[in-house]
């Protein structure tokens, strides 16, 4: 290595340089970086596989615990308008108007019932309210549609509408369109937006829907009744006397009709009240306002027996609290199962590791046998063993320990779950213990004995401390497996032996409340990580050995 | 339930049905059902005869109906629908329709008319409880009891309230681990008039009342979650009486010859049928529509009753119900809809439970866990 000769004195003990003249530190770190990249490239396939097939789906699922876009996506105008509402009394007719237009489009897209299902988790009755409203909204618009139609049948024709609303350029393209090709993008006629702002907006929504989702030409499809409602609103506020575009007479006649005292109108508030009286209660609007944000803490609050209210989080009524209790029960029962596994597994592992290899192998097969049997079969077998007319009760009655009418209840409760799960998880305890114990040299025990220790002292002071890492590894395995167990508690748990995982499964497959299921799952994951961290701090993860 | 169909949906259907000729039908079809005796009845009554007419068609079965709603939602999110026709209970059909996962259809367009020319819509009548639901059978949730465990001196139970009468009929009962049906029975036996049950159940006081009534037998109840549980519990003598689907009890009584009898009082009628998933491509849809038209015609629905004791959903099928295919016994008296069995019944209230399911279930589960 050469230092350059013309460096000033003070830099003499400056950075050492590599052969190519770059500072050694830099050169080394570059070499290290290349090595790291190479290593990364080698594990990249596995890493990407795990990321794509494991981490990403889990993250996506957990993300649902806060996701709440459906409300603002389905009713964008309403949620924006509700932001200014103070939550007392009924919202203004303007909010009802926005809700009308939002829900009308949602109903055409059949999205209103999904929103109803979502809100029904928060407010009972929302499901049928939205389903009913999807059908009932037509009644509001038909009031106007019918009157316009009676005046001039052209108001129920596709073509005059398209000619009035669309630009010349677009009309020519739309007329030339043939089935199978792309529909030309709808463009509004100049000036129509200023003259009839609401109608233009609603017609544009209708045009985009007809083009994109139905794939139909606007020259064949007459607009839906929300457009007629918008037209009535425009004609009652705008002056169209200066209009000279297509169908000017038709529009002016309609304006005259709207101005006449005979013209029937219905306020949006009344229209909604007509569909269902629940719309005239502030509760549904409060729920909509509360769940308007794109992200919500509502699911997490639900999963700790609280609920979101306009005044912040609040505890649920006593007769609806269940999740905290289930979390506690899950942790407690998993702990009991882990302890039972230690008590039952330790002697087995001890014998296994101290027997001659041939006998040990035979015993090992007996330990592994349950592993190779279906989980369902093993669980159902416990049912037959433990039920009141089952094997154990029959034997107890036969030998006279238990009266025939006093048979023990050992299944469909906590006891049944603990017994069945201890049995199922036992191999996960025995195997790590065995592999640790078989590395403990026999000479230690002999040495202790030759130094005068009793059998108990030898075991407790010499053998046991060396087997602790096996207990640690087994306990972590069994505990974490137990906490997420689902099928066994479902079959033998009855009502007092079920776990939080059973509720998660219920919300995934039966109630379809995936947000709540995700929140419960996230909490469970956090609890496991926390316990793991605590274990590391107290016992030390270095003390865990799998062999 | 009042139904309005958009003109658009109808035209889309007509175009789809008209434009695709027989040659454009897919030859592979995946049907989803419940497995067990019920699926067997569908295979024998619909699928086998259909395959005889169309030997080129392959029908595969997936026994996923119990999780159909969650799975269809997942498939829809993944953008890959692998099922062509799904057998679900009516409540699930309504939810799938709400979620936009099931296709709306026009009964007169899709389904065959009755032999006397009655339109499909009239023949099925009120059974079409959702725009997406293609009814197949009427089943009921009802009770069975062990005849050999009836206490000496007591009449065999014939009244739903004997479920709540632990003095006359001691012993365990098995009930489904969900509020639906149990809450109705509890209120009815607590003195609420039948036509007021849902009004009462809609109030928090009514829900408490139902739970209080259930509380009186809570210690004697084994809760089931799979339809096969009660038949097994009855056969083992674990329970004296239990609720389950009437077809399961028929099989325990007539096929397995167990000392079990039916108690039809206050049986709750429910419907089961097909839905077509939304988003099938044209040739798959054409095949499914062809199959559904065949499988829901008058004769096919009547044929199914020869294999399982569920009532056909078509009025015109009822007179054609004959004998059990293997046992050779008359099936009519075993149908839940038979007048002798249907003296006192309840119809599953779809709208009520769609609204109150989450709320009441939370209370019910909290009560169970106490």
Image (cartoon, rainbow, N blue to C red):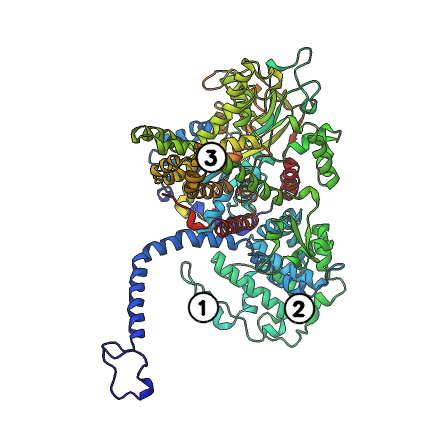
Q: Which mark is residue A234?
A: 2
Q: Quadrant of residue A92?
A: bottom right
Q: With respect to residue B353, does A290 lie above or below?
A: below
Disc 2 versus disc 3: distance between alpha carbons? 53 Å
Residue A526 at x, y percent in the picture: 53, 51
Say which of marks 1 and 3 sits in front: 3
Residue in the picture at 76% in, 29% down: B191
Q: Which residue is mark 1?
A: A173
Q: Which residue is mark 3?
A: B33
Given residues A367 and B74, the one toward you in this image is A367
Dot 1, crowdedness within 10 Å: few (<14), some or many (≥20)? some
Letter of the chain that mark 2 sits on in the rendering: A
Mark sitting earlier along the chain (2/1):
1
Q: Does the rendering let one see residue B189?
A: yes
Residue A413 at x, y percent in the picture: 58, 31
Q: Quadrant of residue A159?
A: bottom right
Dot 3, crowdedness within 10 Å: few (<14), some or many (≥20)? many
Residue in the picture at 30% in, 84% down: A12
**Are the residues under badges 2 and 3 in a single subunit?**
no
Disc 2 versus disc 1: distance between alpha carbons? 28 Å
Given residues B306 and A509, the one toward you in this image is A509
B50 vs A193, left or right, is left
Letter of the chain that mark 3 sits on in the rendering: B
Q: Does the rendering let one see residue B275?
A: no
Letter of the chain that mark 1 sits on in the rendering: A
Say which of marks 2 and 1 sits in front: 2
Whether the residues at callouts 2 and 1 have beta carbons within 8 Å, the answer is no
């Amino acid at each position: 290595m050469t230092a350059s000769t013309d460096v000033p004195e003070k830099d003499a003990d400056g950075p050492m340089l590599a052969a190519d003249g770059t500072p050694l530190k830099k050169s080394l770190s570059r070499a290290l970086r290349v090595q790291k990249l190479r290593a990364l490239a080698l594990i990249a396939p596995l890493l990407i596989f795990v990321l794509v097939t494991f981490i990403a789906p889990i993250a996506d699922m957990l993300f649902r615990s806060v996701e709440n876009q459906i409300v603002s996506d389905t009713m964008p105008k309403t949620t924006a308008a509700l932001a200014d509402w103070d939550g007392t009394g009924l919202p203004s007719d303007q909010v009802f108007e926005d809700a009308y237009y939002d829900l009308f489009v949602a109903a055409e897209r059949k999205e209103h019932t999904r929103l109803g299902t979502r809100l029904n988790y928060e407010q009972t009755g929302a499901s049928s309210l939205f389903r009913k409203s999807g059908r009932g909204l037509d009644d509001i618009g038909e009031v106007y549609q019918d009157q316009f139609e009676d005046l001039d049948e052209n108001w129920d024709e596709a073509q005059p509408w398209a000619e009035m609303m669309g630009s010349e350029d677009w009309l020519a393209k739309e007329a030339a369109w043939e089935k199978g090709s792309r529909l030309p993008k709808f463009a509004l006629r100049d000036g129509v937006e200023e003259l009839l702002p609401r109608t233009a907006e609603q017609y544009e929504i209708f045009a985009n829907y007809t083009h994109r989702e139905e794939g139909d030409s606007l020259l064949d499809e007459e607009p839906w009744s929300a457009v007629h409602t918008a037209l009535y609103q425009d004609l009652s506020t705008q002056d169209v006397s200066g209009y000279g575009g297509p169908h000017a007479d038709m529009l002016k006649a309609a304006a005259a009709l709207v101005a006449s005292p005979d013209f029937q109108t219905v306020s949006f508030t009344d229209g909604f009240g007509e569909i269902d009286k629940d719309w005239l209660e502030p509760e549904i609007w409060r729920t909509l306002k509360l769940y308007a944000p794109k992200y919500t803490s509502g699911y997490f609050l639900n999963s700790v027996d609280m609920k979101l209210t306009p005044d912040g989080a609040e505890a649920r009524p006593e007769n609806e609290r269940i999740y905290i209790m289930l979390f506690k029960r899950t942790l407690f029962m998993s702990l009991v199962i882990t302890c039972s596994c230690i008590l039952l597994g330790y002697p087995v592992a001890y014998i296994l590791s101290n027997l001659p290899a041939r006998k040990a192998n035979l015993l090992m097969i007996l330990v592994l046998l349950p592993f190779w049997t279906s989980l369902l079969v093993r669980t159902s077998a416990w049912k037959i063993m433990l039920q009141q007319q089952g094997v154990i009760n029959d034997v107890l009655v036969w030998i006279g320990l238990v009266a025939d009418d006093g048979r023990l209840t050992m299944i469909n409760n906590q006891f049944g779950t603990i017994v069945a799960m201890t049995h199922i998880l036992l191999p996960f305890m025995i195997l790590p213990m065995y592999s640790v114990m078989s590395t403990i040299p026999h000479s230690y025990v002999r040495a202790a004995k030759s130094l005068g220790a009793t059998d108990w002292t030898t075991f407790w002071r010499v053998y046991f401390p060396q087997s602790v890492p096996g207990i640690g590894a087994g306990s972590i395995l069994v505990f974490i497996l137990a906490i997420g167990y689902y099928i066994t508690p479902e079959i033998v748990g009855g009502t007092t032996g079920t776990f939080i995982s059973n509720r998660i499964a219920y919300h995934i497959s039966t109630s379809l409340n995936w947000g709540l299921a995700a929140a419960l799952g996230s909490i469970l994951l956090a609890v496991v990580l926390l316990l793991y961290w605590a274990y590391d701090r107290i016992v030390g993860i270095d003390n865990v050995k799998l062999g | 339930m009042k139904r309005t169909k958009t003109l658009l949906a109808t035209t889309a259907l007509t175009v789809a049905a008209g434009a695709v000729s027989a040659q454009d039908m897919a030859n592979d079809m995946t049907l989803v059902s419940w497995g067990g005796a019920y699926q067997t009845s569908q295979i024998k009554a619909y699928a086998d005869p259909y395959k005889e007419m169309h030997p080129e068609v392959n029908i595969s079965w997936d026994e996923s109906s119990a999780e159909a709603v969650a799975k269809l939602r997942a498939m829809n999110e993944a953008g890959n629908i692998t099922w062509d026709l799904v057998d679900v209970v009516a409540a699930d059909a309504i939810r799938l329709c709400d979620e936009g996962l099931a296709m709306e259809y026009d009964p007169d367009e899709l389904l065959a008319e009755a032999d006397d020319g009655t339109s499909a819509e009239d023949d099925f009548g009120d059974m079409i409880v959702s725009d997406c639901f293609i009814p197949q059978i009427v089943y009921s949730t009802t009770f069975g009891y062990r005849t050999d465990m009836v206490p000496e001196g007591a009449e065999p139970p014939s009244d739903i309230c004997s479920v709540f009468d632990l003095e006359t009929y001691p012993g365990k009962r098995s009930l489904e681990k969900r509020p639906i049906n149990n809450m109705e029975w509890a209120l009815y036996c607590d003195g609420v008039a039948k036509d007021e049950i849902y009004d009462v159940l809609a109030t928090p006081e009514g829900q408490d009342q139902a739970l209080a009534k259930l509380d009186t037998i809570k210690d004697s109840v084994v809760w089931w979650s799979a339809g096969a549980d009660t038949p097994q519990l009855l056969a083992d003598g674990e329970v004296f009486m239990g609720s389950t689907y009437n077809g399961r009890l028929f099989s325990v009584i007539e096929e397995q010859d167990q000392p079990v009898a039916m108690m039809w009082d206050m049986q709750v009628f429910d419907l089961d049928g097909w839905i077509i998933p939304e988003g099938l491509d044209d040739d798959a849809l054409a095949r499914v529509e062809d199959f559904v038209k065949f499988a829901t015609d008058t004769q096919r629905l009547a044929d199914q009753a020869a294999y399982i004791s569920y009532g056909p959903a078509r009025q015109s099928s009822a007179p054609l119900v004959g004998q059990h295919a293997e046992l050779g016994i008359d099936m009519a008296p075993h149908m839940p809809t038979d007048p002798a069995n249907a003296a006192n019944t309840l119809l599953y209230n779809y709208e009520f439970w769609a609204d109150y399911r989450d709320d009441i279930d939370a209370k019910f589960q909290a009560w169970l866990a106490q």
